[in-house]
Amino acid sequence: MILVDAGPLVAIVDAGDQHHQTCVDVADSFKEPVGTVWPALAEVAYLLRDLPDAGNAVWEMIEVGALSLLQLGASDLPRIRALMKKYADLPMDLADAALVAVAEREGIAKIFTVDRSDFAVYRLHGRGRFTIIP
């Protein structure tokens, strides 16, 4: 599975986004399933608040199964909090912390993001690196 951050989701559905064509091309090449978490979707909804059709396109991706929604539960909160504390100097936001926590929990090392600078710093279980796409 490949985890997807908010940035590529916004770029895919917003033709005016600077990363639009790159993210569309990359997403079209995926052979593996893709998934995200609720905090990343909240970020997408906020960023697309002025483009309701684009926001609806993201919901449709979930409805048709093109994008999976990975669950977060109370048991994930201690790790999310620890990650946000560890990377407070960046700072790490909730969406990034949730993605890293789910990646660790599920053994996922691939992340589709336009936020290369932060995800290049984050470490899985404190040592492993993400494979950042694109």
Image (spheres, rainbow, N blue to C red):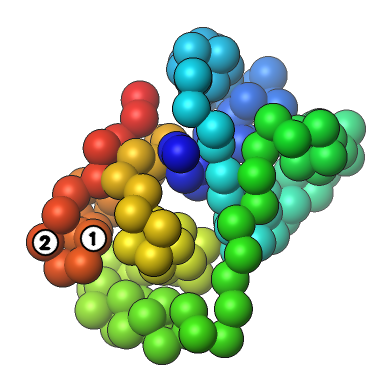
From what the image shows, is residue 105 above or below residue 68?
A: below
x and y, in percent, of residue 56 in the image: 86, 38
x and y, in percent, of residue 13 in the image: 71, 27
State the mark number for residue 124.
1
Task: Tell me the kind of residue under disc 1.
Answer: Leu
Q: How far apart are labels 2 and 1 at the CA level?
A: 6 Å
Residue at the (25%, 45%) spot, across then down: 130
Q: Which residue is mark 2?
A: 127
Residue at the (58%, 71%) spot, across then down: 72
Mark yes or no: residue 65 visible.
Answer: yes
Q: Nearer the viewer, residue 108 or 77?
A: 108
Left or right position of 79 against 77: left
Task: Tell me the kind of residue under disc 2.
Answer: Arg
10 Å crowding of disc 1: few (<14), some (14-19), many (20+) = some
Question: Circle 1 sits in a helix, a strand or a loop, which is it?
Answer: strand
Left or right position of 77 against 82: right
x and y, in percent, of residue 126 in the image: 16, 68
10 Å crowding of disc 2: few (<14), some (14-19), many (20+) = few
Please, which residue is most extreme toward the left here? 127
From what the image shows, is residue 116 above or below residue 76?
A: above
Q: What is the quadrant of residue 105 in the picture?
A: bottom left
Residue at the (68%, 19%) spot, across then down: 15
Query: Dots 2 and 1: beta carbons under 8 Å?
Result: yes
Question: Circle 2 sits in a helix, a strand or a loop, which is it?
Answer: loop
